[in-house]
Structures are given as structure tokens and as C-alpha cells.
Image (cartoon, rainbow, N blue to C red):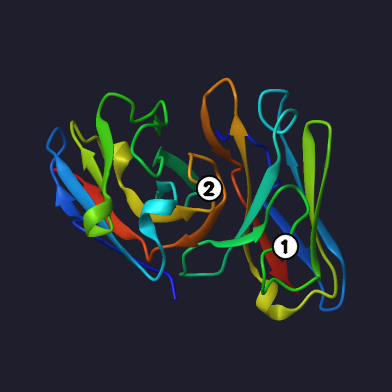
Amino acid sequence: QSVLTQPPSASGTPGQRVTISCSGSSSNIGSNTVNWYQQLPGTAPKFLIYSNNQRPSGVPDRFSGSKSGTSASLAISGLQSEDEAHYYCAAWDDSLNGVVFGGGTKLTVL
Amino acid sequence: EVQLVASGGGLVQPGRSLRLSCAASGFSFDDYAMHWVRQAPGKGLEWVSGISWNSVNRGYADSVKGRFTISRDNAKNSLYLQMNSLKADDTAFYYCAKDVMRDINFYFDNWGQGILVTVSS
């Protein structure tokens, strides 16, 4: 199982706001920032959120991130059909001295 | 435009070796750390290894430590992954990914297309 814990699935209707959680520990999220990646079906992952809440250029402001303690969240507002994808959180783990990912959350737009 | 093109994947028997390559273009390759991230079919992402811009720092996931070796040739704008003693669990799509930092971090801002490695007899 993954070091970071995400719900396996999430869903929402167009226009809705959905959030995806990512739970870790003191050695990863608790002491380092969190990044998020979006993977559309059949494609390579895409850099979505970095340093907890920063968006790379080109990422719509409908996507936002937050972190509190050993947990982080990704929020998507104004949900669109093209947001249907897998979402992964990631952090550096000081104990493992490496990168750890969450297991991924499949977002379905109903 | 950043391009990362992986090659060298394929079918290999358990216990054998394989070397992946990733050709980079569109950016100053020797200014950034690089990584390999894999994804077993239908599964999540797993960081495999990373290397700093000058090859001084290298990191590995516990699952591959002692079997895989990451390297780079800045003169050729290329990243490599030497995989030895392959196991069925190593079957996955392997992505090369560019970091935004010089040293190993986890800000993968550009990804290659992924190449499939299948370990089976």
C-alpha cells in the first residue's frame, strides 16, 4: 500500500466543487510540502499543484491545494467533464529519503 | 518545448537486465535533476530513482535499491536506468521526468511518454 493515503474514488456533477484528501505522517506531509499530479486516461501525469497551493503556469485557478498538519487536500471548483482523471499527491519522505506518492484518486464527472 | 523520449523497454525474463534511456531536448538538461517514475498497469505512481544535475546525489526507492542504477550524460542530454535482477513486480510503464530543481526533489514539471517494461518468462 502507498505511504500517502487517498480515497480511491471521488465524483461530482458539472459545476460542483469536489475535494480530494491526502493523508500522511510527520516524516512526509508533516515536514515537507505537497505536490499534486493529474493523469488523464492514457496519458503521462501532469504537474498540477506544487508547494501545497501553487499552480504552474497554464493550470486553471479552478484547481487549488491546501495543507494542514499531516494532511493535504486538492479542491476542484466549477467541475468540468475534462477534469475526469486520476489525481495523485506526492511528498518527500525524510525517513525513506525519497519521494512518496498517494495511491491515486479516480475522479468521475457524473 | 520540453521533450523527454524514453527508449529501451520491452519483454525480459526474470533475473535478466535491461537499460532504459531518456533523450531530453528543449531545455538546459544539465541544469536540472531528473527522475524515473513507474506505474504498473492499472496501478498508481511509484518513484523509482532520481539524480541531481551533476550526478553527485542519487536516490532510490527501497524496492529497487541495489538492483537499479540511475545515471546521466549531460553532454548527450540523456538519462539512463540500468535495471538488473529484474522481477515480475518490476513490470510497469517507466516515465522519465524533469525536476524544477538542480538537486533531487519531487517537482516533476515535465514527463516523458512512458515506456513499458514487462518481466515475464
The crowd level at tag 2 (other Cα within 10 Å; few <14, some 14-19, many 20+) is some
Q: Position of residue B86 (x, y in %)?
A: 21, 36
Q: Quadrant of residue A83?
A: bottom right
Residue position marked by numbered label 2 in the rendering: B101
**A75 or B80: which is nearer to us?**
B80
Residue position marked by numbered label 1 in the rendering: A55
Give the structural element (helix, strand or loop) at label 1: loop
Is B66 situated above or below A37? above
Q: Residue at x 47, y 64 (%)?
A: A44
**A94 or A83: which is nearer to us?**
A94
The crowd level at tag 1 (other Cα within 10 Å; few <14, some 14-19, many 20+) is some
Asked whether residue B57 is in view, the answer is yes
Q: Quadrant of residue A55?
A: bottom right
Q: Quadrant of the N terminus of chain A?
A: top right
**B101 or A45: which is nearer to us?**
B101
Residue type at mark 2 is Met
Q: Nearer the viewer, mark 1 or mark 2?
A: 2
Q: Read off the chain for label 1.
A: A
Residue type at mark 1 is Arg
Give the structural element (helix, strand or loop) at label 2: loop
Q: Position of residue A60 (x, y in %)?
A: 75, 74
Q: Position of residue A20 (x, y in %)?
A: 77, 52
